[in-house]
Structure formats: structure tokens, C-alpha cells
Amino acid sequence: MAAGAFAWARPPRELKFSQLKFVPPAVQKMVLKSGATVFLLPDHELPLINLTVAVKTGSMFEPSDKAGAANMTAALMRGGGTELRSREAIDEELEFIGASAETGMDIESANASLNCLTKDFSKTLGILAEILSRPAFDPQKLELEKARQIEGIRRRNDEPFQIARREFRKAIYGPTHPLSRVLEISSVKVISREDLQAFHKKYYSPANMMIAVSGDFETADMVNQLESAFSGWGNGVPVLPKAETVPEGQVPGTRHVVYAEKSLNQCSVIVGHLGIKRHNPDRFALEVMNDILGGNAFSSRLYKEVRSRLGLAYWVGSNFSEPYDYGVMASGSQTKSGTVGLTVKTVLSEMEKITKGEVSPAELQLAKDSIVNSFVFRYNSPHAIVSQTMSMAYYGFAPDYLETYTQKINQVSAADVLAAAKKILHPEKMSIIIVGNKKDFDEKLENFGAVTNADLSIKE
């Protein structure tokens, strides 16, 4: 090989790359005669079909005195069999053809899904439609599910950081809000088969569903199969109850501490407060700010200061959420008991700094590149694209949200980041949640604000 064959090579830092562009394939959208909204993205590369269903409901709409009923409804729809066959018969049939059909429940939606070979789609779709439309809610399976949930409640204090998350949400939302509601054994025990039937009857119908399908199919044939599977049942579109919300603009007036005692030599810490609602116009600037503050696992300010320079934490980071109500803006970490005070001070200091001055050009560009690159690769499969398109419609985002996302991130300036930080981040009003053993702490908790002791008892 000639000596000059690699003369063109340059150091990696000198290489220039064009900006990544996200141009997703076109997703077809239509409404079935049954009222279900369908999103379709054919892909003939492999003989597979994936389907996801979103139902306009969620645990936010369950009665507060029957907390757990929504999740139990979804669990028993799949785990309790149907009026035509048992769960075991469904399991056996799906296993024989190498397919799956599942159901689930979140705070703001219910979901169902299937994946199978193209040749087995009709059979698998029939099973899923049967699960959705004719669940049996087998009484014996119900008692097993209640026992499983009760055992989970009894073990909810096993993981310290989960305690911190639970107490943080209770601190900022209150105990009854759907985003902070905690299951108790008493509420699980009183859930009846009739409660599950009522929840299912009220919310599950094709007119209250969105369906995303990708894979090896022809559009006309798929529409015909979906029309057949999702017709002839349901009660139309339900009137959704009004879910509890936080009073407009509510932020704690002073910093306060919630302490949960746990006999450990390390602490779990969350520092944060209420953030923004979904569709907030500052969300793009906030996403860049969060990446710089603590969202990036290796280049963020919190990582460099708390973990790398001071060696205070095993891990540290920040995040924000955008649910139906106010979300959270928070930092989380785990540290030694003897450095918990210094860790909290350092986190608060970094939060304060990002509200006082513009981020550097290098920080800004690195954050934007990181967000754009990770966004593009989150949608590297047809089903990721079609299901996310459905999700954006479900939550009321603009039709071009995915297509314009990277552009809006790239338009964020250092001034935008500072303005968002000043508006949304208030270190002096943070809720500070600490789970650990305070006899080993390096700082009195009262130095950070009024202290409340968390009640970790489990009531039978």
C-alpha cells in the first residue's frame, strides 16, 4: 500500500459533520367506522406486524377510595381470561404461534399491544380484540392479583430511592393527587369484580381508542381487518371525569425538608419543585437547560461538580416532566451519609448558578447536539415512529411536532436558556427529600428549612 494512502486522514476533533435531519416516513391516519383513530406505517422488510392501542383513560380517573382499580382492570383483562377462553388457553395459543398480546395502564392512558408474524396476524388480532372487548375478570385471578398488589405495598419501603420519589411527589402534589397517590392495602382489599367491570364498560370502546400499526401489510387489507375486529362493541366516547389539579402557579413559599429514616450508610436525595405543564412554550429551552444542568450523564454541570470534582455521589442528575398537570423539575442523587449536606448545598448552588448567567457557547452546542442526536435515534424503527405519532396525537401535540422538534432545539439560544431557568427554577423554594440515617449526617437538616418526618408505616 502506498505510503501516502492515508494522507487525507485528520484528527477526529477537526472533522466536520453536517447536522442530522429527522425526516420520518409518512404515517397514514384515518378513522374507522367504529370511531377508532388508526395510524398506519407499512414496512415490508420483515414478515412481522406490531400494533399498539391507546385508550383514553388512566388511573387518574379511578375513584380515590378504590385506588388500584384501574391497574387491576388492565392486569385482569389479560391475566383473567375472556368470556370465551381462559388465560391459560390464550397463553398456550399465543405461545404456539410465537406471538404476544398484552394490556397495561398508566396514569393518563390505558394501553394494549400485539406483535406476531404476518401470517398469524388475523388470529392474534382476534385474540387481542377479544381481550379488550370481552374480559372475564375471573374472580380467582382477581384475588391473586389483589394478593400480588398487597405484597408489593408491603415491600414498598425496600428500595430507598423509591421512597424518596414517593415522598417527593407527596410533598409537592399532596397525598390525593393522581400523580402522587399511593396504594394502600385497605383500598386494594375492597376492589371488587364489579368495580373492574364498571371501569371497563365506561372507558373501553373503539371510539375511545387510537391504534398504531406497523409492519408487513397492505393498507386496504389492514383497514378491513381492523374494521372487523373493532366493530360491534363499546359505548361510544365517555365523558371523562375532572381529575384533581394543582392550583394555578402553586409553588411552595419557602424551602422545606422531608426526612425518611432508613438505617443505611448512604442517602437518597431529591431536590426539586413543581415545573411546567405539557405544551409550555418554554419546554425546548428547558430541555436544553436541563441537559446542561444534570440531564446529560457525563457532561452536565452536576455530574462534573458533584461526582467528578468533589466525589460526593455515586450518581447525580436532573430531569423534568410534562404530565397533564404541572410536572416536576428535580435533581436526584445518592451519596454517603457523611456528605449529604454538602451534596445538597452543591446541587442548590449549581441550580442557582444556571439562573444567574448565560451558559457558555460550548455547553449550549454540546447540549443541543446531544438532544438532537438522541432524538433521531429514538425513532430508528417503523413502530417507534408510528406509535410516537399516535402518542403525539393522543396528548394533543401539533401534527408536525416530530418533524420540527430538532429545528426548535437548534434554535434555542443561551438567552433562551437563562430566561427559562429564571422563570422555572427556584432553588430557594425547593422541596428536599432525604432518605437515610441522620445521626451520620454532616449537616443539620434544619439548616435547609423546616423539617417534616415522613410516615413510612404500612397500614393493614
Image: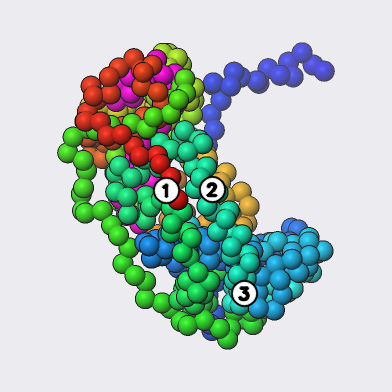
Q: Mark 3 points at which residue?
A: 136
Residue occupying the point 44% across, 66% down: 57
The boundaries of the magenta stretch are: 319-348
Identify the residue position indicated by label 1 in the image: 459
In primary-sequence order, the first of circles 1 and 2 is: 2
- The image position of residue 323, as x and y in percent, is 37, 53
Mark 2 burial class by Cα count in 10 Å: few <14, some 14-19, many 20+: some
Seen in the picture, residue 293 relative to 140 is either above or below; the reply is above
Residue at the image position 63 percent from the left and 52 percent from the top: 381
The x, y position of residue 47, in whole percent, is 77, 62
Front residue (pair 393, 27): 393
Q: Is residue 358 visible?
A: no
Tell us which disc is closer to us: 1 or 2.
Answer: 1
Please identify the residue farthest to the left as the structure is shown: 253
Q: Is mark 1 on a helix, strand or loop?
A: loop
Please tell me whether mark 3 sits on a helix, a strand or a loop. loop
x and y percentages locating residue 163 in the rendered image:
43, 38
SS at circle 2: helix
**Residue 378 part of the magenta segment:** no
Q: Is 207 situated left or right of 103 in this image?
A: left
Q: Label 1 to label 3, Cα distance in Å?
A: 31 Å
Amino acid at pointer 2: Gly
Residue beneath the point at 50% across and 69% down: 192
The numbered mark at residue 248 is none
Q: Which amino acid does label 1 sit on?
A: Lys
- Between the residue at mark 2 and the residue at mark 3, the CA separation in whole angstroms equals 24 Å
